[in-house]
């Protein structure tokens, strides 16, 4: 498992809007490809997802992973990154409620469920959905091995 980010060093973790631990970066986006991993987890949080979704390198890696039919897990605001990578067309997924319009505008089907498994994706709405998200994520990842 690697923590991947646009730039080397550390990233600031958050719990909602409050700063949490600093997290060391293992690799940068320009150092990775879909071939390097069996699956991808996009953590939640509005601030991170909003910053990452505009990064062309994030969009490229997401497209590679999806094209390789590898599992993608996204919770909370992380589906924004899938929207910006132009991957949600025709897909059913969930997310934090405030980005449902973005998903619908990208021609995805948003549903208000604690967890949605659709093909190689698993999505959830928020932190309190983590038990269901984790269960389905692990099941999806196990099937991909």
Image (tube, rainbow, N blue to C red):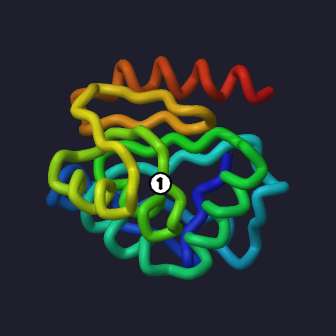
Image vertical order of residue 98 relative to residue 50, above or below: above
| Left or right, residue 88 beside residue 120 | left
Extreme-right residue of the structure: 35
Indicate the quadrant containing the N terminus: top left, top right, bottom left or bottom right: top right
Q: Nearer the viewer, residue 138 or 114?
A: 114
Residue appearing at x 60%, y 33% in the figure: 119
Q: Position of residue 26 (x, y in %)?
A: 65, 63
Q: Position of residue 114 (x, y in %)?
A: 28, 26
In what element is the residue under mark 1?
loop
Using the rendered view, name the quadrant where residue 109 is placed: top left
Q: Position of residue 83 (x, y in %)?
A: 42, 62
| Left or right, residue 98 beside residue 69 | left
| Left or right, residue 92 beside residue 96 | right
Residue appearing at x 51%, y 66% in the figure: 86
Q: Nearer the viewer, residue 52 or 59?
A: 59
Q: Residues within 10 Å of mark 1 (few under 14, many from 20)?
A: many
Residue appearing at x 37%, y 20% in the figure: 132
Label 1: which residue? 88
Number of numbered discs visible in the structure rendering: 1
Image vertical order of residue 58 relative to residue 88, above or below: below
Indicate the quadrant containing the C terminus: top left, top right, bottom left or bottom right: top right
Residue appearing at x 68%, y 42% in the figure: 39
Using the rendered view, name the quadrant where residue 59 is placed: bottom right
Image vertical order of residue 107 relative to residue 145, above or below: below
Q: Position of residue 78 (x, y in %)?
A: 38, 54
């Amino acid at each position: 498992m690697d923590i991947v980010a646009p730039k080397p060093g550390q990233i600031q973790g958050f719990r909602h809007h409050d700063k949490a631990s600093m997290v060391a970066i293992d690799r940068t986006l320009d150092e990775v490809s879909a071939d390097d991993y069996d699956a991808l987890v996009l953590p939640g949080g509005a601030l991170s997802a909003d910053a990452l979704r505009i990064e062309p390198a994030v969009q490229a890696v997401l497209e590679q992973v999806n094209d390789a039919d590898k599992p993608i897990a996204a919770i909370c605001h992380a589906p924004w990154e899938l929207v910006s990578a132009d991957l949600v067309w025709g897909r059913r997924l969930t997310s934090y409620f405030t980005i449902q319009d973005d998903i619908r505008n990208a021609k995805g089907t948003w549903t208000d469920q604690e967890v949605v498994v659709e093909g190689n994706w698993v999505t959830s709405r928020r932190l309190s959905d983590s038990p269901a998200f984790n269960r389905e994520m692990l099941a999806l990842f196990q099937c991909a091995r």
